Every structure is written in structure tokens, then in C-alpha cells.
Image: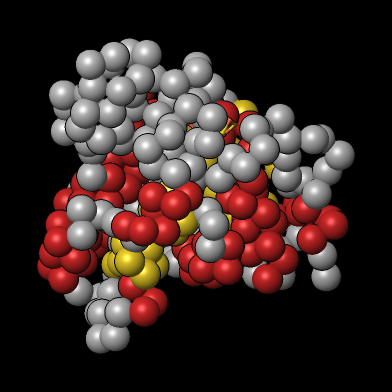
Amino acid sequence: MATLKDFRNNVKPNWCPGCGDFSVQASIQRAAVNLGLEPEQLAVISGIGCSGRISGYINAYGLHGVHGRALPIAQGLKMANRELTVIASGGDGDGFAIGMGHTVHAIRRNIDITYIVMDNQIYGLTKGQTSPRSGEGFKTKSTPSGSIETPLAPLEMALAVGATFVAQAFSSNVKQLTSIIEAAVQHKGFSMVNVFSPCVTFNKVNTYDWFREHVTDLDETPGYDSSNRMAAMSKLMETSGLITGIIYQDTSRKSYEDLVPGFKAEGLANQDIKISKEDFEKL
Ligand code: SF4
Ligand code: MG
């Protein structure tokens, strides 16, 4: 049985001290152990950005892809080897700007992978420009007078395009983040996990203290029903998305690969891929 040590390698992260991404890395490693995975049963596929380095810091299969393209790689990998636990990860710029087309279609396709977005409301790797998640009035090198665009609401977007698992976490709450990653991996379908992961170097607005002050934890909200899509959307809109926990989960829908008989028993190799008329009508 693998331990945390098995998921560690000797590559020293070059994230800034205090960067939220450290906790995301630690939580993925802890979740993998808790799920009883071995390193060779996990693949972490990342895009470009500070967060994209994560695939190099975990001892598992990994690929540091190109900008905004973690999801196509991760989906292809899962379809080719459906026994593998596949985690795609990247930043808000990676997933919600250049990669947004992939994000929307991966969500509605519902392939059984987990997508973890390290959302710091800025482009960190390129030293601080406005991202799709930056708030109105946010001043950066690319918006010296303040951003005039509406920030993207990623989880409302995910719900709108048919997500079957929607959760949000804060990197300072490693316990909750770890349990959310575990639940996301266990969910049979596409799991969307947005993580408030502060950029301590370039984002001086959305800091750890700012999130502590503004975020409500659904785990401390009695009576919240995460199976109710309408309630999930209302909760996100009421709180401007500043909630953590499992916001929505639909366990009734089959994952993409379960609807394609050719992928059921084995991977792509030597498969004569045919969709029966009955299964086609369910798509
Ligand atoms: Fe993290 Fe920001 Fe430093 Fe990048 S620049 S490593 S996002 S703190
Ligand atoms: Mg970012």
C-alpha cells in the first residue's frame, strides 16, 4: 500500500514561498494515498502557468502540456486507459481563457476525470496580468486603470453546461481540499474542482485573509442539498461564488466511456469501436 513518500519525488517546487499551489499538490498526494492508489495508477496532466508545474512535482505519470490543452490530453489518456485515475490541472488563465473551449466541452462530455483549477485571479507566471477571474477594478500591468470586464463565474458556467460534479475549495483548508479531491476522483464522470489558491506575489487583493473573510463553507451550512442543481445555482449566485464544499453532484448520469461499449472492457488498442443503436439513442 503506497504512502505519501511514494507520491513524492526529489524535484523542489519553484513556487514562491506561501503560494497556494503547494497545498493543492499536497492534497492530491494525500488524496491518492487515502484512495489506496499506487503511483502507477495515477496520471496528473497540466497546462501552462505556475500551477502547470504541478505534474512535475508528484511521483506519478505526468505530462506538462501546452497552454490551455491539459483537458484534451487528459481526456484522450482516460479513453485509452480507462483503469487510470486521471487528474487534469492548471490555472484560471489556462482553463478559463485559452482553454475555455476545451473546458466547456469536457464538462458536458462527462468523461471520468477530475479537473482541478488553481484559481488565483491573475496570471502569475507572466508576472501579474488580469485573468478571466480578476475582479472588476482589479489593477494589474495589463489593466493599470482597473479591469472593466465582468469576472467569469466558473462554477455557474459548469452547472449551465451540464456538470455532474462541482466543488470548490480553499488552499488553506487542506483537510477539506483533500476530501473534495477524493470525492471528485470517486465520482463517475467529469469532476470540476475550483480551488482558491492565492498568488502571494502578484495578487495583493485576493489574499488568504481576504478569502478567510469572504468565503462561506457549505459543510457548515445545515440543510444544503448538493443534489439540487437549481439550489446549487442559487447558492453560487447569492454568494458571488464565494463558497467552499461540494456544491453539486449528479450520480444518475453515466460517464462518457460507459456509453461507448467499445471502451468498456479494454482500452482503445485493437478495439472495433461501434455504438449500438440503443446506446446511440441515449447519447
Ligand atoms: Fe504562486 Fe504567484 Fe508565485 Fe506563481 S507568482 S508561484 S502563482 S505566488
Ligand atoms: Mg492564474
The quadrant where residue 227 appears = bottom left
- How many marks do you count on the picture? 0
Instruction: Give the colouring mode of the picture.
Output: secondary structure
- Horizontally, is 125 left or right of 58 in the view? left
Give the quadrant of ligand 1: top right
- In the picture, which quadrant includes the N terminus? bottom right
Q: Is residue 186 left or right of residue 220?
A: right
Q: Is residue 16 above or below residue 229?
A: above
Residue for point 58% across, 50% down: 24
Can you give x and y, in whole percent of width and height, for residue 88 in the image? 52, 43
Where does the image place residue 133, in percent across and percent down from the top left? Answer: 30, 35
Across and down, in percent, residue 105 comes to 29, 40
Q: Is residue 100 visible?
A: no
Q: Nearer the viewer, residue 247 or 277?
A: 247
- Residue visible at 80% across and 49% down? 8
Residue at the location (78% across, 53% down)? 7
Extreme-bottom residue of the structure: 223
- Res 55 → quadrant: top right
Q: Position of residue 182 (x, y in %)?
A: 55, 67
| Left or right: 259 as drawn, with respect to 176 | left
Q: Is residue 47 visible?
A: yes
Quarter containing the C terminus: bottom left
Residue drawn at (77%, 46%) of the image: 59
Q: Is residue 258 above or below residue 252?
A: above
Left/right placement of residue 70 relative to residue 158 reads: right
